[in-house]
Image: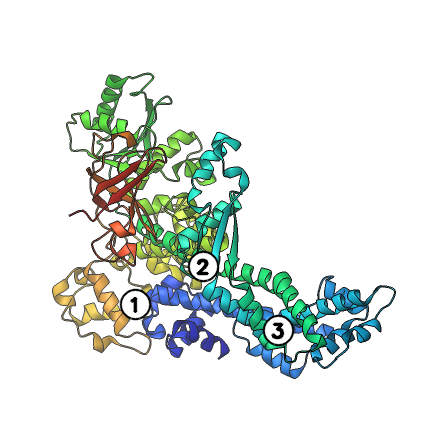
């Protein structure tokens, strides 16, 4: 019940939904499977809500694990009382738990611990009692071989008092409150970077990226996540120093109000101890804690931005099964050309040299024209890296005898893929340049199938992705990839190991087994045949079957998102309306007349039945949009060609909390700040633009020295 209440307090979801979802998770069900095929048990929760349950379940388990460790430690120390045990067991967050444990934690050698060993704890207790009127004479009694005089005795006693003050949870919480509400984040430039002449040119250029933060001050609770991460990166790279500031006098005064009750000889010692506790123990530890908490929140926001961008990128419009000529452009090294058939297999590769220094433009045009005709090319994919614009211009000059669409495709991560083990295993006889060109072509055909082969962090749609918690980032991005793969579904007879490994219930090892089975025994003709894959048991089949599609199989339902466990219901519906399942599929007129209430059972209700009917109307429909042809302004090649006021076509290539970046066909992407997105206030950039959206932007400002371009979507 504790777990259920903990999750409910953070999500506000119905207890029954939480309980049933946790049961399903404990039965090793995946989030995509639960959200789609167990709606009756969850109360129709979506993937996001189920993901929240997963998140807070993990937090609760981490908290409980820490409680067990602390209780065990206290038992070993023989200091665990019933009252203390109750406090620990009822703690609802790690901060509270650690504050309870702090006074009893085994300590490393501290000034207070040394003072205790020297017999000064009784003197500290006398001072804390605040009843002594002649503290010097009492301190004199504690002089020994280690404590030479009265001042040494008082100082040692104060160290013990400082530790007691530091361990008081009410005082710690008060300092936390002041830091959370009133702290300013302050930065100062490292002295050597004040003057550019004192640093090497490369370092100076890098430092200029952070010059806005060389002398910065703002309330921490108003500092946007992207700015905080930029400041912390600048500190990490050694350009600035960062600290939190609050009204120290006010903070110390608050502590004195809680500690000091009289005005006698003890008061002076307590005031000194309070100052020491605050400056040496409380403020350094708690300011770090609060800054780390702010960093954690900033991480979460940055990861959320990355996850949203990645989802949009993975669900980008596919061209589909077409014959594609892909070009990885370059100058000196030439342009690598590959021809791919409709299944994405490599059928031809060559290098052409249309640009400087060889300038064999005519030879390149002749070669491309002949390849288009020879391999019945339907589309050309050009990588958007070096020499992309020049190559695009070359292609558009060619008068093809057949209809050929031309696309510029993002190369982000292609070099990572081409040198990876996955690429080497796929194309062991080709070098990295050929593999890179193949990846560009396949991205056009099916972005999802190709991008799952690349570490998501290398795709280049994140915000400070290298500065955030890497474990959290990987977990979040893996969840997004899994979600996207299962939203679209996977053709089990053509999918790669990388794609199959993200299917609900499969994973890398079973994905390899599926490929091996396919290679040895041929294509799968039914979902039932999937059960024959080695080590793919009933649970894995239950979790994966509906996401694995069989094109042109024995049962038409095998190419749909209808789960095999629901085939019997579909058969009954078909029988009742006196038609076959094959005729039922796609027949909206019949499907819309079905009285679904008649088919409800103890386990299958209207949510699942509605999903089945929706799927039967358009079985296996790809939820992704259709790809659109796009052309940049042919007169803009570099940042020097830009002029304020120009209207340019562009493609949104990254979304952040502070706006979006737009590729306008040159090396540098331009920024549309959130204030220039629309005529209204924008709280969420994703409400205005989506990744890879084609837009027309207005040039507001060009800073050639810093290579920064300000654009606007709000110009009408």
Asked whether residue 320 is in view, the answer is no
Residue furthest toward the right?
Answer: 145
User: Horizontal and vertical percent for residue 237?
Assistant: 52, 43
Tell me where residue 345 appears, x and y as whole percent.
33, 36
Q: Nearer the viewer, residue 675 or 630?
A: 675
Q: Position of residue 549 (x, y in %)?
A: 31, 54
What residue did someone put label 1 on? 566
Please determine whether, in this image, residue 233 is positioned above or below residue 401. Answer: below
Q: Find residue 683 and report its image quarter.
A: bottom left
User: Foreground residue, 118 or 563?
Assistant: 118
Q: Which residue is mark 2?
A: 220
First in residue order: circle 2 vs circle 1: 2
Q: Earlier in the sequence, mark 2 or mark 3?
A: 3
Label 2 residue SS: helix
| Separation (CA) of disc 2 from disc 3 | 25 Å
Front residue (pair 599, 69) = 69
Displayed quadrant of residue 335: top left
Query: Horizontally, is 585 left or right of 178 in the view?
Result: left
Task: Give the colour scheme of this rendering.
Answer: rainbow
Q: CA distance from mark 3 to mark 1?
A: 60 Å
518 with respect to 158 (left or right): left
Residue 239 against residue 658 in the figure, above or below = above
Tally of marks: 3
What's the residue at 77%, 75% (across, down)? 135
**Measured Cα–Cα span from mark 2 to mark 1:** 54 Å
Q: Which mark is residue 149?
A: none
| Residue 150: quadrant of the picture | bottom right
Mark 3 or mark 1: which comes first in sequence?
3
Extreme-left residue of the structure: 589
Disc 1 packing (10 Å; few <14; some 14–19; many ≥20): some
What numbered label is drawn on residue 168? Answer: 3
Residue 376, compared with residue 139, is above or below; it is: above
């Amino acid at each position: 019940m504790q777990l259920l209440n903990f999750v409910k307090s953070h999500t506000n979801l119905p207890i029954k939904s939480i309980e049933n979802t946790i049961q399903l998770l404990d039965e090793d069900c995946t989030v995509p499977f639960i959200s789609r095929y167990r709606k009756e048990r969850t109360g129709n929760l979506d993937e996001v809500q189920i993901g929240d349950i997963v998140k807070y379940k993990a937090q609760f388990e981490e908290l409980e694990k820490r409680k067990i460790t602390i209780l065990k430690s206290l038992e070993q120390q023989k200091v665990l009382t019933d009252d203390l045990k109750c406090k620990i067991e009822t703690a609802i967050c790690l901060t509270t738990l650690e504050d309870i444990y702090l006074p009893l934690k085994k300590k490393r050698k501290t000034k207070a611990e040394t003072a205790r060993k020297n017999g000064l704890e009784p003197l500290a207790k006398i001072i804390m009692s605040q009843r002594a009127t002649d503290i010097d004479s009492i301190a004199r009694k504690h002089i020994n071989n280690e404590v030479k005089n009265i001042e040494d005795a008082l100082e040692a006693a104060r160290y013990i008092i400082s530790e007691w003050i530091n361990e008081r949870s009410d005082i710690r919480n008060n300092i936390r409150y002041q830091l959370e509400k009133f702290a300013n984040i302050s930065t100062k430039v490292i002295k050597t970077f004040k003057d550019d002449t004192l640093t090497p040119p490369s370092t100076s250029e890098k430092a200029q990226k952070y010059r806005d933060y060389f002398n910065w001050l703002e309330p921490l609770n108003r500092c946007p996540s992207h700015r905080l991460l930029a400041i912390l990166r600048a500190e990490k790279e050694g350009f600035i120093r960062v600290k939190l500031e609050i009204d120290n006098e006010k903070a110390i005064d608050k502590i004195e109000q809680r500690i000091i009750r009289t005005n006698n000889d003890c008061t002076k010692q307590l005031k000194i101890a309070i100052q020491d506790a605050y400056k040496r123990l409380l403020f350094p530890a708690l300011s770090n804690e609060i800054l780390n908490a702010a960093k954690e929140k900033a991480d979460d926001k940055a990861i959320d931005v990355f996850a949203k961008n990645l989802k949009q990128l993975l669900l980008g419009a596919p061209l589909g099964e077409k014959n594609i000529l892909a070009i990885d452009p370059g100058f000196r090294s030439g342009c690598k050309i590959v021809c791919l058939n409709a299944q994405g297999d490599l059928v031809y590769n060559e290098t052409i040299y249309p640009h400087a220094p060889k300038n064999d433009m005519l030879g390149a045009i002749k070669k491309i024209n002949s390849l288009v005709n020879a391999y019945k090319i339907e589309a050309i994919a050009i990588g958007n890296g070096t020499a992309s614009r020049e190559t695009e211009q070359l292609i558009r000059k060619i008068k093809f005898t057949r209809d050929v669409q031309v696309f510029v495709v993002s190369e982000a991560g292609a070099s990572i893929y081409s040198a990876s083990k996955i690429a080497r295993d796929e194309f062991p006889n080709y070098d990295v340049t050929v593999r890179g060109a193949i990846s560009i072509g396949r991205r056009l055909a099916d972005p999802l199938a190709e991008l799952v082969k690349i570490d998501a962090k290398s795709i280049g749609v994140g915000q400070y992705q290298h500065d955030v918690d890497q474990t959290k980032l990987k977990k979040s991005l893996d969840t997004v990839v899994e979600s996207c793969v299962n939203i679209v579904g996977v053709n089990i007879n053509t999918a790669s190991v990388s794609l199959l490994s993200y299917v609900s219930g499969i994973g890398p090892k079973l994905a390899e087994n599926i490929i091996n089975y396919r290679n040895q025994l041929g294509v799968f003709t039914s979902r039932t045949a999937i059960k024959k894959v080695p080590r793919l048991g009933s649970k894995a089949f239950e979790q994966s079957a509906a996401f694995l599609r069989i094109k042109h199989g024995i049962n038409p339902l095998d190419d749909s998102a209808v789960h095999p466990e629901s085939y019997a219901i579909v058969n009954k519906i078909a029988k009742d309306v006196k038609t076959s399942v094959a005729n039922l599929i796609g027949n909206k007129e019949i499907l819309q007349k079905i009285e679904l209430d008649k088919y409800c059972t103890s386990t299958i209700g209207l949510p699942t039945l509605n999903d089945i009917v929706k799927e039967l109307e358009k079985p296996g429909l790809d939820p992704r949009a259709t790809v659109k042809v796009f052309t940049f302004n042919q007169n803009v090649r570099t940042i020097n060609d830009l002029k304020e006021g120009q209207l340019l076509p562009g493609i949104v290539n990254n979304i952040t909390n502070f706006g979006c970046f737009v590729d306008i066909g040159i090396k540098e992407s331009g920024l549309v700040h959130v204030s220039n997105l629309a005529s209204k206030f924008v709280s969420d950039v994703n409400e205005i633009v989506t990744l890879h959206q084609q837009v027309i932007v207005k040039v507001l400002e060009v800073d050639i020295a810093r290579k920064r371009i300000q654009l606007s979507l709000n110009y009408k």
